Amino acid sequence: MLSLAALALRLPASGCQGRRRSIATVVSGNRTSKLVRERLQKEVEKMRSQFSGFRPGLVILQVGDRDDSNLYISSKLKAAAEIGIDARHLRLPNTATQNEVLQNILSANDNVSVHGLIVQLPLDSVNRIDTQLITNAISPEKDVDGLSCINAGKLSRGDLKDCFLPCTPYGCMELIRQTGVSVAGKHAVVIGRSKIVGAPMHDLLLWNHATVTTCHSQTRDLPQQVARADILVVGAGRAEMVRGDWLKQGAMVIDCGINHVPDETKASGKRVVGDVHYASANQRAGFITPVPGGVGPMTVAMLMQNTVQSAQRFLRNQKH
């Protein structure tokens, strides 16, 4: 079964001319994240049995009260509770100063019961706060979002076993792995170069032995670049930008986009779409992630993975 799926990635576009085009295999983030959470739950139970009730600790620091941040945080707290992680939501008012935020981070850094610390972005304060300064104040050993310059630097150098991987690219790699298709030797194209998705995605693909092209707002002939991709990862933040006829026949398409477009048939008057035009892309791709239900659930799952991994490192260090 797998060899046929892998073969689809190697077929040139002309290979399907004159034949009925097949529908892409949907790579479900909901299903894959469930598998990850179930595995992590067992790992946490093992830690608790071996170390008398020990639980991995996660702190989620929020500034302000944005609705979208509240939604993301609630999904993280729910996942942590299912797995057995002791997650604490620390919300500061939107009047918080940069120094107050830093003091809370330093306190969590020094707390041995906290194994993971994340700052929910954006920081919603009436005061000016340097986001990069805040992110880099998190101890690299507790930076389970993988966004500090220390962890980003290790990733860029290929030190994958000595850093925390950013959760969204990490989730993308897990989705690719679940298909059974090898990244090694493939031509991968990443659209977007953000610090959270695009740049670390490039590094992860590169150190897993793909040949990687990164495209961005200044890239010329974007459809031509996309047409070369065996693996396409899109994190551009533009609704349905990538069209199906841009794709190489049988390509793997990982869509990191979350965009709201008007839809009068919905009670809210809008619906969520990705950066890829799904209806046309799934007629040409070999594998494709849906939006919603694709990359999104994996981001939360890999945050939990990093937190459990951090707790395991803590316990190992306690033995020495």
Image (cartoon, helix red, strand yellow):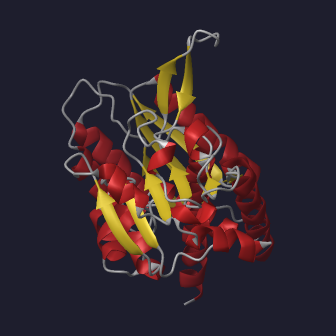
**Along the line of sight, which residue is nearer the eye, 110 or 20?**
20
Residue 21, image x and y in percent?
A: 67, 51
Q: How many marks?
A: 0
Q: Is residue 22 left or right of residue 291?
A: right
**Along the line of sight, which residue is nearer the eye, 130 or 88?**
130
Q: Is residue 262 left or right of residue 33?
A: left
Which of the image's four quarters has the N terminus?
bottom right
Can residue 265 be spotted in the picture?
yes
Residue 171, image x and y in percent?
A: 56, 59
Instruction: Please identify the quarter of the rendering in which residue 296 is found.
Output: top right
Can residue 147 be spotted in the picture?
no
Q: Residue at x 75, y 52 (%)?
A: 31
Is residue 210 depicted above or below 193 in this figure?
A: below
**Along the line of sight, which residue is nearer the eye, 311 or 266?**
266
Instruction: Please identify the quarter of the rendering in which residue 49 is found.
Output: bottom right
Q: Residue at x 43, y 41 (%)?
A: 120
Is residue 74 depicted above or below 126 in this figure?
A: below
Q: Is residue 148 left or right of residue 177?
A: left
Q: Residue at x 50, y 59 (%)?
A: 248
